Image (cartoon, rainbow, N blue to C red):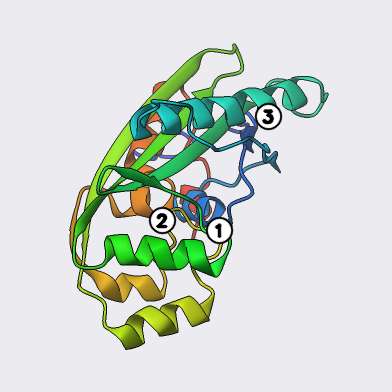
Amino acid sequence: MASSSEPATPSWRPKLVLASASPRRLALLQQAGIEPDALLPADVDETPLKGEGPKDLAKRLSRSKAEIALRTARNREDLKDSFILSADTVVVAGGRILPKAEVVDEAAACLRLLSGRAHRVYTSVCLVTPKDTIRERLVETRVRFKRLSREEFEHYLASGEWRGKAGGYAIQGLAGTFVIKLVGSYTNVVGLPLYETVALLDGESFPVRFTWLNAA
């Protein structure tokens, strides 16, 4: 018989779908002891609408990703009662929304804007419950880069690490050496603010600590 001082461990947990193909977001969830039951990445046009600000863009894209994954999940018997989690990250420098760099010219333009100045990173997290209730959180982090030398600039572009990254850099990689100051959530800059994500899941009674007792 378990001691009354031991935390209760549920024998079952609802399923969780991550609406993302990002290995970074998956790794962050796993860091928190949460293993998604399925990955349902959504292909959405990430071009900002005319006059759309970075906060609204992040919120619109994260919700769109969740809604697309939701339609797929609800049509699958194994996922029809699952939670759906999505996120979108937007980087802003000098009043400009920076792209997810796919070619070296885009990455170079991003680095020129980021070098020696501060920028902001916004991530919107969207959670859809099994009852189709939608919960959202928007997180902002301020980051300041050092002034990059020509060698740093050229070698980072040559590394290819920027490919597919919002703002053309990955703070958890080589570009972490460029950061002078960070105010806010580090995991937000990586792509999924863990505190806010876990708070959303907790608030909807998802057992986020289901695996913690056996983590060792």
**In which quadrant of the rendered view does residue 53 lie?**
top left
Which circle's residue, 3 or 2, is located before the other in the chain? Answer: 3
The CA span between labels 3 and 2 is 25 Å
Q: Nearer the viewer, residue 50 or 141?
A: 50
Front label number (3 vs 2): 2
Q: Nearer the viewer, residue 187 or 107?
A: 107
Give the residue type that dot 3 points to.
Ala
Task: Work out whether 87 lies above or below 67.
Answer: below
Q: Secondary structure at mark 2?
A: loop
Q: Which residue is mark 1?
A: 164
Task: Work out whether 75 lies above or below 173.
Answer: above
Q: Position of residue 94 (x, y in %)?
A: 25, 48
Outermost residue toward the bottom? 151
Q: Nearer the viewer, residue 59 or 198?
A: 59
The CA span between labels 1 and 2 is 9 Å
Q: Which residue is mark 3?
A: 69
Q: Which mark is residue 167?
A: 2
Q: At 81% across and 21% down in the image, what residue appears?
A: 75
Q: Secondary structure at mark 3?
A: helix
Q: At 30% across and 54% down in the image, what residue appears?
A: 186
Q: Nearer the viewer, residue 63 or 55?
A: 55
Callout 3: few (<14), some (14-19), or many (20+) C-alpha neighbours within 10 Å? many
Q: Position of residue 169 (x, y in %)?
A: 42, 64
Q: Position of residue 173 (x, y in %)?
A: 42, 71
Give the residue type that dot 1 points to.
Gly
Q: Secondary structure at mark 1?
A: loop
Residue 90 visible here:
yes
User: Left of 122 or right of it: where is 163?
Assistant: right
Give the residue type that dot 2 points to.
Gly
The CA span between labels 3 and 1 is 21 Å
